[in-house]
Image (cartoon, helix red, strand yellow):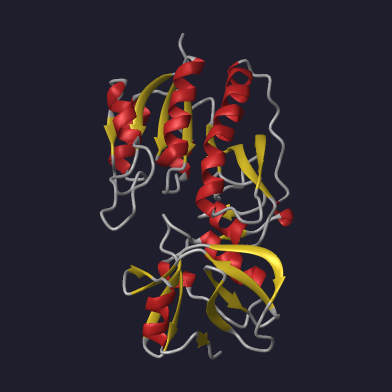
């Protein structure tokens, strides 16, 4: 009998997960995904389009844990559940349906960075490594026993988007390696030691506000953690809101020691920070316009924007 699954999926990882299941010989009886949010920047692949291409039924419930839906899914009698970047938690009644278990692909090296936006949090904290983890699903998020992991490097000037693009091929490597072993019953799940990591919540645009009391390295990490296609890092000065849409850090000493400021030199904007280090600003934006030297001076009436904190 062909192994069957119901897949809960979204985003690029969801697309890759479905492709890997089909390649491994799974019959996907149903795909459960999300309706795209018109307020969100949709830069990633469509799970629904891929499922339609393969003539797999698709549903987009607001809550997958409704009694009627649980009954509908149980009637399909899947052997497995898989969750690939699906944004809702699956309750105990859903998780009890598949006799072979439910498995989730998470975007970190568990038990680190459990919860929401794991790539953004890892970049924000200056991590040098992250990855993807396949683990058993339990009612507590990202807490079930580990199946396997695939690591990727985080380079000092990579954005969260750069890192996420690395995770998609890493997910393919991991699933291509794991799924045949999972089907053959040759994997022994390893319990996670949750004390070795932490749980993180979701992020909102307001979380991109820059605290200029922080070091240049920490501010750079925030900027790259929320750089486009995410909402971006920002600060307010004299009623004006500036966005920093990219940065480059190379451990340079600040020019204006003892001052926190933004200025133009050598063809770039720079920020001198409270720790007397500086970083290069790749894109400085005000009122929807990317600024050049002339526009910056016209707005600030100076060569130097001193930031009060």
| Position in image of residue 107 (x %, y %) | 56, 45
Is 46 drawn above or below residue 211 in the view shown? above
Is 240 left or right of 113, judged from the image as shown? left
Of residues 145 and 154, the one nearer the viewer is 154
> Residue 100 is drawn in which quadrant?
top right
Relative to 78, does residue 93 appear above or below in the rendering?
below
Instruction: Point out residue 66 in the picture as x, y percentages from the top left corner.
Output: 32, 45
Query: Who is closer to the viewer here, 305 or 99?
Result: 305
User: Which quadrant holds residue 257?
Assistant: bottom right
Q: Name the residue at 52% across, 68% down.
A: 267
Left or right relative to 125: residue 305: left
Identified at 48% across, 23% down, the residue is: 21
- The quadrant holding residue 229 is bottom left
Q: What percent of the width, then of the height, locates residue 85?
A: 46, 42
The image shows residue 184, relative to residue 124, as above or below, that is above
Give the answer, above or below, for where 294 lies relative to 244.
below
Spot occupied by residue 64 in the image (x, y as percentages of width and height): 35, 44
Visible residue check, residue 254: yes
Residue projecting furthest to the top: 1
């Amino acid at each position: 009998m062909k192994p069957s699954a119901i897949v809960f999926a979204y985003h690029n990882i969801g697309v890759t997960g479905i492709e890997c299941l089909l390649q491994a010989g799974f019959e996907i009886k149903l795909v459960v995904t999300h309706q795209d949010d018109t307020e969100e920047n949709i830069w990633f692949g469509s799970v629904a389009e891929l499922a339609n291409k393969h003539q797999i039924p698709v549903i987009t419930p607001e809550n997958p844990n409704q009694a009627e839906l649980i009954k509908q899914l149980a009637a399909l009698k899947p052997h497995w559940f898989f969750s690939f970047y699906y944004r809702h938690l699956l309750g105990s009644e859903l998780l009890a349906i598949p006799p072979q278990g439910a498995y989730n692909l998470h975007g970190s090296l568990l038990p680190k960075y459990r919860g929401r936006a794991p790539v953004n949090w890892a970049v924000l904290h200056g991590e040098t490594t992250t990855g993807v983890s396949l683990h058993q699903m339990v009612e507590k998020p990202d807490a079930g026993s580990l199946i396997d992991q695939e690591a990727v490097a985080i380079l000092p000037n990579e954005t969260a988007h750069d890192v996420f693009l690395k995770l998609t091929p890493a997910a393919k490597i991991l699933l291509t390696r794991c799924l045949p072993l999972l089907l053959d019953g040759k994997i022994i799940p390893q319990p996670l030691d949750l004390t070795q990591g932490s749980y993180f919540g979701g992020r909102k645009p307001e979380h991109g506000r820059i605290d200029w009391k922080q070091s240049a390295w920490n501010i750079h990490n925030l900027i790259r953690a929320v750089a486009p296609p995410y909402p971006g890092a920002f600060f307010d000065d004299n009623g004006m809101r500036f966005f920093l849409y990219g940065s480059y850090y190379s451990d340079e000493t600040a020019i204006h020691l003892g001052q926190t400021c933004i200025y133009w030199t050598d063809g770039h904007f720079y920020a001198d920070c409270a720790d007397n280090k500086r970083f290069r600003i790749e894109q400085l934006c005000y009122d929807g316009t990317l600024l050049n030297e002339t526009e910056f001076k016209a707005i600030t009436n100076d060569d130097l924007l001193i930031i009060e904190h």
